[in-house]
Amino acid sequence: MTTDHYGQRSGQAAEDIASPKRTKELIQKYGFTLKKSLGQNFLIDQNILTKIVAAAELDSGKGALEIGPGIGALTQQLAKTAGRVVAVEIDQRLLPMLKETLEPYPHVSVVHGDVLKTDLRELFETHFRDVSKVSVVANLPYYVTTPIVMKLLEEKLPLEHIVVMIQKEVADRMAAKPGGKDYGSLSIAVQYYCEPEVVTIVPHTVFIPQPNVDSAVIKLKVRERPPVEVEDESFFFDVVQASFVQRRKTIYNNLAARYFTKETKGQLEGILRNAGIEPSRRGETLSIEEYSVLSRHLAAALKRNG
């Protein structure tokens, strides 16, 4: 993992990168070919960038961690607001381009590496010691959105916000309420750690190249503590996952298949009713509070069974 720090702040305002003209110029200058496998779509709309940065509530005393800076369009806007910016880029071919576009900003560092393999606690200790709060602000590649967001949350990093542009369908799932088709295990996992808010919808036409679907900017305000009390987080999330294995099946059938044998599944109905849950309900109808109660009752019953 290597880090580049950039030099002296220029007296002149740097040209905005997020325009079709400037983006194409940079791509041509460096002979860059976009890799579909890395989900590379460069944003060319300044208004969307403004909304992303505003949602992060940054100031000169705060830091921003960007994942996948691309050619630096969002990084540049973060640098104008945050006191410290660190961008993690997996594609080594982009480093010379980032060196050029971010040179006017001495408080920006680019780390070459895969964020999923990066020790983020060490990164925070190295780069963000002198800031009061840190937010993740990024245009995430569609294919690794969920693993990246869950890594950020599960490692319980000292984050204020996570403001990311992701596939609209995934943003809808993260912010979904119980009872709808978008509500599932991802909704519960994200809402256990955060308060989600969809900031804006982003049409596919504002990217080079254009993806096949629209995006959305979602703001996740990281909670100081979860909204429910959970004795065993690992088991709680296991119960949630099990409840959605087959969405069309009842909570009873999904949990019976996961935790019980034919001989023991008869007791599951009583466990559900003791938790205040009708066995005929589906997983998508249960609130995070109900999953908390359910996991507690289920864990106690399984412990008694040995």
Image (tube, helix red, strand yellow):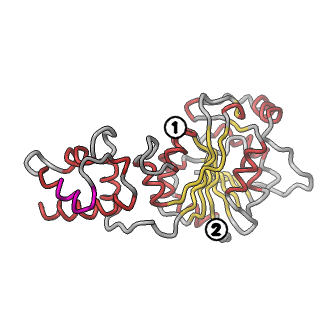
Query: Where the C terminus falls, by quadrant?
Result: bottom left
Query: Position of 153 compared to 208: left or right?
Result: left
> Mark 2 falls on what kind of element?
loop
The residue stretch that appears in magenta: 269-277
| Residue ID at (57%, 39%) | 167
List the residue tagged with mark 2.
133
The residue positioned 57% from the left and 47% from the top of the image is 113
What is the three-letter code of the residue carrying label 1?
Answer: Tyr
Could you say which quadrant of the image residue 202 lies in? top right
x%, y% of residue 18? 78, 40
193 relative to 63 in the view: left or right: left
Percent coordinates x, y for residue 127 in the rendering: 64, 63
Q: Quick check: marks 2 and 1 in contact, CB under 8 Å?
A: no
Question: Furthest residue to the right?
Answer: 12
19 sits left or right of 300 in the view: right
Q: What is the x, y in percent for residue 72?
A: 73, 45
- Report the front residue among 163 and 34: 163
Structural crowding at the residue carrying mark 2, measured as other residues with C-alpha within 10 Å and reported as few (<14), some (14–19) or many (≥20):
some
Q: Which mark is residue 201?
A: none
Q: Residues within 10 Å of mark 1 (few under 14, many from 20)?
A: few
| Circle 1: element type | helix
At x 60%, y 54%, the residue is: 219
- Distance, label 2 to label 1, CA atoms, is 28 Å
Task: From this view, report whether residue 60 is shown above or below residue 38.
Answer: below
Up-down: is 7 above or below 90?
Answer: below
Q: Which residue is mark 1?
A: 143
Membership of 271 in magenta stretch: yes
Q: Nearer the viewer, residue 194 or 118?
A: 194
Where in the figure is residue 6, as x and y percent of width and height? 76, 54
Q: Name the kind of residue labelled 2 in the image.
A: Lys
